[in-house]
Image (cartoon, rainbow, N blue to C red):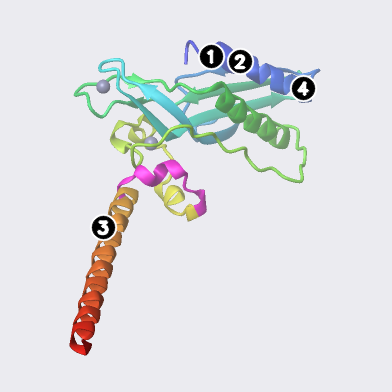
Amino acid sequence: MALDAEVWKQVFQELIQEVKPWHRWTLTPDKGLLPDVLKPGWMQYQQWVFARFQCSSCSRSWASAQVQVLFHMHWSEEKSRGQVKMRVFAQRCKKCSQPPFEVPEFTLENISRILNNLVLRILKKCYRERFKSMEEIPMIKEVSLEGPHDRDNCEACLQGCCAEPTQAMSLPTSWIPRANATCPSGEHFSSYAPRSHTRRNIVGTCCCLLLLIVVVVVIIKTL
Ligand SMILES: [Zn+2]
Ligand SMILES: [Zn+2]
């Protein structure tokens, strides 16, 4: 986050100045930010997004679609000044015995999408602007995921403030990214399907052979 902070700030400035050029907004990282712990007049916005991690002990890398990005926003009308505090929740390696928490790496494309969603939320919540469509822009998941969310190694889960499991479970099938085919249930399904195919093929071959034998026997008898 320390390295990335400048990128986040810069992209945020570009986006907010496009819509509110006369207002001063700042974005600052805050590691102590907690969901639902808000100062008076502040608003909260949470997104669960896709990012990559790399273990600093063993260099293993992994991807997660459930990285929590938490924003707290405050708008002061008399000062024409807005503040955003943000926190990105970390994850740690599941292969190492005492792994440190790692901050995620985001693509610039996803940083833009996350901040675009944030600016839309600011316009709606702080400026009470109305839009025909307020749909969030989905994240780009560019690699396959290793399986279900690793709750034991997710900082937000360990602090009891990660996404509710029912939300992930209730996603319609069309919503589950293609990458999820590698999750345990997907694996089970894909390894089962070819097996039943081969079984069907064997049965088919046997039937053909039997038919051939019958035909040959009939031909021999008629001779
Ligand atoms: Zn590791
Ligand atoms: Zn979690």
Does the CB distance between marks 1 and 2 fall below 8 Å? Answer: yes
Q: Residues within 10 Å of mark 2 (few under 14, many from 20)?
A: some
Q: Is residue 183 magenta?
A: yes
Inspect this view and state whether residue 221 appears: yes
Dominant SS of magenta comes to helix
Q: Give the CA distance from mark 4 to mark 3.
A: 56 Å
Q: Secondary structure at mark 1?
A: helix
Residue 190, horizontal then vertical, whole percent:
33, 52
Camera-near label (3 vs 1) is: 3
Question: Relative to 105, is 36 above or below?
Answer: below
Q: Earlier in the sequence, mark 4 or mark 1?
A: 1
Location of residue 179 (image quadrant) = top left
Q: Is residue 195 magenta?
A: no
Q: Give the CA distance from mark 2 to mark 3.
A: 52 Å
Identify residue type, mark 2.
Answer: Lys
Location of mark 1 (residue): 5
Instruction: Name the residue at 48% across, 10% down.
Output: 3
Q: Give the CA distance from mark 3 to mark 1.
A: 50 Å
Q: Secondary structure at mark 4?
A: helix
Of residues 70 and 75, the one drawn nearer to the viewer in this rendering: 70
Q: Residues within 10 Å of mark 3 (few under 14, many from 20)?
A: few
Location of mark 3 (residue): 195
Q: Earlier in the sequence, mark 3 or mark 1?
A: 1
Residue 18: give its label: 4
Q: Give the CA distance from mark 1 to mark 2.
A: 6 Å
Instruction: Name the residue at 71% across, 37% down.
Output: 124
Instruction: Name the residue at 31% across, 15% down.
Output: 56
Residue 9: give its label: 2
Q: Give the CA distance from mark 4 to mark 1.
A: 20 Å
Does the CB distance between marks 4 and 2 fall below 8 Å? Answer: no
